[in-house]
């Protein structure tokens, strides 16, 4: 498996080099730009960590649902309604830690509620969650856009945006090696650990995974399968909503139209890279963040951002090809 | 290259196949005369299925030669084998439940890119009638009984003009009557010039229906003989080699029968199609007793099993475990109350194939105090527990971290049975517990089930092999289209009559 990973990284570098050459730039220079732009300076590193935060939360959400066998494509919508709800809860609620707690709770709850209809439809009517969640993404993006353009618009704002949150609702950072790391991201690390622990050590986590791996065996093992589906979608949605709340409290401090550049969709790729191991979400989200941040630098350098997206796409494709390769079976 | 192969449908010559360090097939040759039924027998892991998959193009041998008709051939894949007239029905039926019977029949062998339903259906019907089968062509295949799926699989081979039919354990899921019917149709196929290779564990089938038999043991060719030259009992000895029990003795009946433990009264259950699958069934299993449920497949056994486990709702009636009503309790509570199960379909209901043995070892038992405390899985004791389960019936395996998928089917079954027996319950519900196991392993498992009963458990055993049931049960109940009745005497005739009575 090790050499495959090395081959994968090498392959990505080669593809990137070829693509950059086609775009008319020197591959070596482009690569240094990419690495420098994402990891080269403390500022770049801080930006990469910021990119990583929403990707991490959203991908934990997707990952959790996948463990129970459900593909929650609706994470983007849950992220959006979570961010919006957290913003208004923060604006209306008290300042300080209480306000932060309230905003986080409100965001998570909103995400969970957004995932509820697909959850119920899946659990009790066996309606496919991909269809229902993807539809709710559109509803979420139109709905949140309407709120910030209409009833929730800051009175003095020129564009569709909410008012800014008071400074007391800022999550804050700690400095690690001269790089500010948001408590939000640290919370994401913690959540990965909790999810990994829960899945492997707790009976409820075990039952959750049995449902994902073999629902009929789950039923025979005394597990209430519809209940697991409900739980999976609600957890997943709540984590998506939590990610939105963290994004607001840690970085954005307001909600506006087109709040997410597609974190939810990118997180699907992150979760697919992670497979069945929660901790792999960390390097996978990190890789996506490096390519996103470095891609911006490349863009300025003159290589279109589409090329880094293309590389990401290839990474996922190759990983999927390796993971789902048919094993030769013996009698 | 043209080989002189007159009279043989095919020849496998000196086939060797290794999987890593294991030699699965060691220089094995097999030639089968055209128009005959030839049995390939051996214990689990003897290499029977592997050899058949070589002939079917699904496995490439490391060395050896394959001759079909008069031609030496290479079979890089099954498509080539099918084109050469070789077809195989494996133990796990490849019928897609979402498709209709007709769609399943023609799948991958459609006569043209434009599918003409009516004309296909009339061709399918003609083919089915030749075999004395009948199908509702436009019903989804999910409605088929195992016997029906088996028949559809055979028809699929004929649709593809297979002249060499490989059947891997075809009667494992069938009632005696369905099994006999199957062999009757195979014999008519053979007399029309087809060749049948039968991979089986069941010696009576070999003796009754086959012309010649090849015995494999541990990947090696042991012998090939004409069936009519065999002494009774000789074949069993050839299969297991030296040091094997004479004929399996009839188990002693329950020495001590205790209080009623599993009690079912007036139980009615709806089937998937809204039919009355079980009609007012009443029976009691006392502790210390092994009670068998015989019956033609699809008579309501499955529904009864599911209702006692609690995964199928009941229409009316009562189920109780040791005087306690359980019919309104969810399955988890019934397991907590002492119910242990050996499900019918190992792959679908009893294991997670890609998981380790360790993770599989607590499946269904995860909430019992032995395996979790305060909602946390007892990881420390789980490894020991897994060893214990695996060693109960000498499951051939590596470490407990090894994936379930890396075990052979028989070893998986051993593991599943041991898991149910080793965890101390009070009621054991077993559906064909020795499915796919060889003689020696089956005998050990039935002995273990008897011991479980002797230690105070109640056992309800659903089976399709009447001889096994008669040999190992204290009493036999017969299900016949949803009606349950008890056989007055423990003879093949008495039970058989009840199975088919109108």
Image (tube, helix red, strand yellow):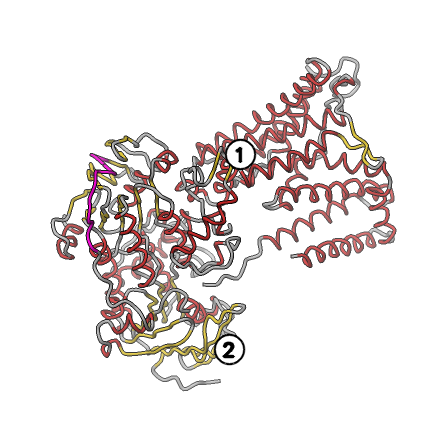
- The part of the chain drawn in magenta is B252-267
Provide the secondary structure element on which disc 2 rests: strand
Residue under label 1:
A232
Measured from the top left, where is residue A135 in percent x and y?
Answer: 58, 32
Residue under label 2:
B63
Q: Is residue A252 visible?
A: yes
Measured from the top left, where is residue B294 in percent x and y?
Answer: 22, 50
Along the horizontal axis of the image, is B154 left or right of A299? left
Residue for point 36% across, 84% down? B6
Measured from the top left, where is residue B364 in percent x and y?
Answer: 41, 42
Identify the image quadrant of residue B328: top left
Q: Residues within 10 Å of mark 1 (few under 14, many from 20)?
A: many
Residue A34 included in the magenta stretch of the image? no
The answer to whether B50 is drawn above or below residue B337 in the figure is below
Residue for point 32% across, 50% down? B144
Identify the image quadrant of residue A84: top right
Q: Residues within 10 Å of mark 2 (few under 14, many from 20)?
A: some
Comparing A55 with A14, the one in front is A55
Cα gap from disc 2 to disc 1, whole angstroms: 51 Å
Measured from the top left, where is residue A61 in percent x and y?
Answer: 61, 35
Along the horizontal axis of the image, is A22 left or right of B284? right
Residue for point 71% across, 47% down? A312
Provide the secondary structure element on which disc 1 rests: helix
Comparing B499 with A42, the one in front is A42
Q: Is residue B194 visible?
A: no
The answer to whether B355 is drawn above or below residue A55 in the figure is below
Residue B259 included in the magenta stretch of the image? yes
Of all chains, the one bearing label 2 is: B
């Amino acid at each position: 498996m090790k050499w495959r990973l090395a081959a994968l990284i090498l392959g990505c570098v080669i593809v990137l080099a070829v693509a950059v050459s086609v775009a008319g730039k020197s591959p070596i220079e482009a690569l240094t730009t990419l690495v420098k732009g994402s990891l080269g300076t403390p500022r770049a590193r801080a930006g990469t960590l910021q990119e990583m935060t929403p990707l991490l939360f959203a991908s934990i959400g997707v990952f959790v649902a996948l463990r129970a066998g459900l593909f929650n494509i609706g994470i983007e919508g849950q992220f959006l309604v979570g961010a919006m709800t957290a913003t208004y809860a923060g604006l209306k609620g008290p300042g300080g830690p209480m306000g932060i707690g309230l905003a986080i709770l409100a965001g998570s709850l909103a995400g969970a509620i957004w995932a509820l209809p697909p959850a119920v439809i899946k659990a009790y009517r066996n309606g496919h969650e991909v269809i229902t969640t993807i539809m709710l993404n559109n509803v979420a993006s139109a709905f949140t856009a309407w709120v910030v353009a209409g009833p929730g618009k800051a009175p003095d704002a020129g564009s569709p945006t909410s008012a800014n949150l008071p400074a007391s609702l800022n999550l804050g950072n700690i400095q690690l090696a001269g790089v500010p790391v948001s408590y939000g991201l640290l919370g994401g690390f913690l959540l990965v650990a909790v999810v990994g622990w829960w899945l492997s050590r707790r009976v409820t986590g075990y039952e959750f995974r049995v449902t994902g791996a073999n629902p009929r065996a789950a039923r025979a093992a005394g597990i209430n399968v519809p209940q697991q589906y409900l739980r999976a979608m609600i957890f997943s949605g709540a984590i998506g909503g939590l990610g939105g709340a963290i994004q607001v409290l840690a970085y954005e401090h307001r909600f506006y139209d087109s709040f997410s550049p597609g974190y939810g969709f990118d997180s699907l790729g992150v979760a697919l890279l992670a497979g069945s191991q929660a901790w792999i979400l960390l390097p996978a989200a990190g890789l996506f963040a490096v390519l996103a941040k470095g891609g911006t630098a490349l863009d300025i350098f003159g290589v279109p951002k589409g090329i880094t997206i293309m590389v990401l796409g290839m990474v996922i494709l190759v990983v999927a090809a390796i993971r789902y390769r048919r094993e030769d079976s013996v009698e | 290259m043209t080989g002189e192969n007159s009279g043989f449908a095919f020849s496998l010559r000196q086939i060797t196949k290794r999987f890593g360090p294991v030699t699965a097939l060691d220089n094995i040759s097999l030639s089968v005369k055209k128009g005959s039924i030839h049995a390939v027998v051996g214990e689990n892991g003897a290499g029977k299925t592997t050899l058949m998959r070589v002939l079917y193009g699904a496995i490439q041998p490391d060395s050896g030669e394959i001759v079909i008709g008069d031609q030496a051939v290479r079979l890089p894949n099954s498509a080539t084998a099918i084109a050469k007239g070789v077809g195989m029905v494996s133990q796990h039926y490849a019928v897609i439940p979402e498709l209709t019977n007709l769609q399943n029949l023609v799948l991958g062998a459609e006569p043209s890119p434009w599918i003409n339903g009516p004309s296909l259906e009339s061709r399918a019907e003609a083919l089915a009638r030749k075999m004395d089968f009948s199908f509702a062509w436009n019903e989804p295949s999910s409605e088929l009984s195992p016997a029906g799926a088996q028949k559809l699989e055979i028809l699929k081979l004929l649709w593809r003009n297979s002249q060499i039919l490989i059947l891997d354990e075809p009667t494992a899921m069938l009632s005696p009557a369905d099994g006999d019917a199957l062999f009757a149709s195979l014999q008519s196929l053979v007399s029309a010039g087809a060749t049948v290779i039968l991979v089986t564990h069941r010696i009576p089938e070999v003796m009754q229906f086959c012309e010649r038999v090849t015995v494999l043991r541990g990947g090696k060719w042991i012998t090939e003989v004409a069936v009519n030259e065999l002494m009774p009992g000789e074949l069993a000895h050839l299969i297991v080699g030296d040091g094997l029990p004479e004929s399996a003795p009839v188990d002693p009946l329950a020495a001590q029968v205790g209080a009623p433990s599993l009690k079912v009264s007036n139980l009615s259950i709806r089937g998937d199609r809204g039919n009355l699958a079980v009609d007012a069934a009443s029976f009691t299993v006392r502790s210390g007793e092994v009670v068998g449920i015989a019956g033609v497949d699809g008579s309501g056994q499955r529904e009864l099993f599911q209702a006692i486990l609690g995964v199928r709702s009941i229409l009316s009636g009562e189920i109780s475990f040791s005087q306690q009503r359980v019919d309104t309790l969810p399955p988890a509570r019934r397991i907590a109350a002492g119910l242990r199960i050996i499900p019918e379909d190992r792959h679908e209901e009893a294991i997670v194939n890609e998981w380790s043995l360790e993770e599989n070892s607590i499946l269904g038992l995860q909430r019992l105090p032995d395996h979790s405390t305060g909602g946390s899985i007892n990881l420390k004791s789980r490894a020991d527990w897994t060893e214990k389960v695996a060693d109960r019936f000498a499951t051939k395996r590596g470490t407990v971290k090894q994936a379930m998928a890396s075990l052979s089917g028989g070893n998986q079954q051993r593991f599943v049975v041991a898991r149910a027996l080793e965890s101390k319950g009070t009621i054991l519900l077993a559906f064909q517990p020795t499915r796919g196991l060889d003689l020696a392993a089956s005998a050990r498992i039935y002995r273990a089930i008897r011991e479980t009963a002797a230690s105070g458990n109640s056992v309800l055993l659903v089976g399709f092999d009447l001889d096994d049931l008669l040999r190992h049960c204290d009493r036999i109940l017969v299900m016949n289209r949803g009606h349950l009745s008890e056989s007055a005497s423990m003879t093949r005739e008495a039970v058989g009559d009840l199975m088919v009575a109108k």
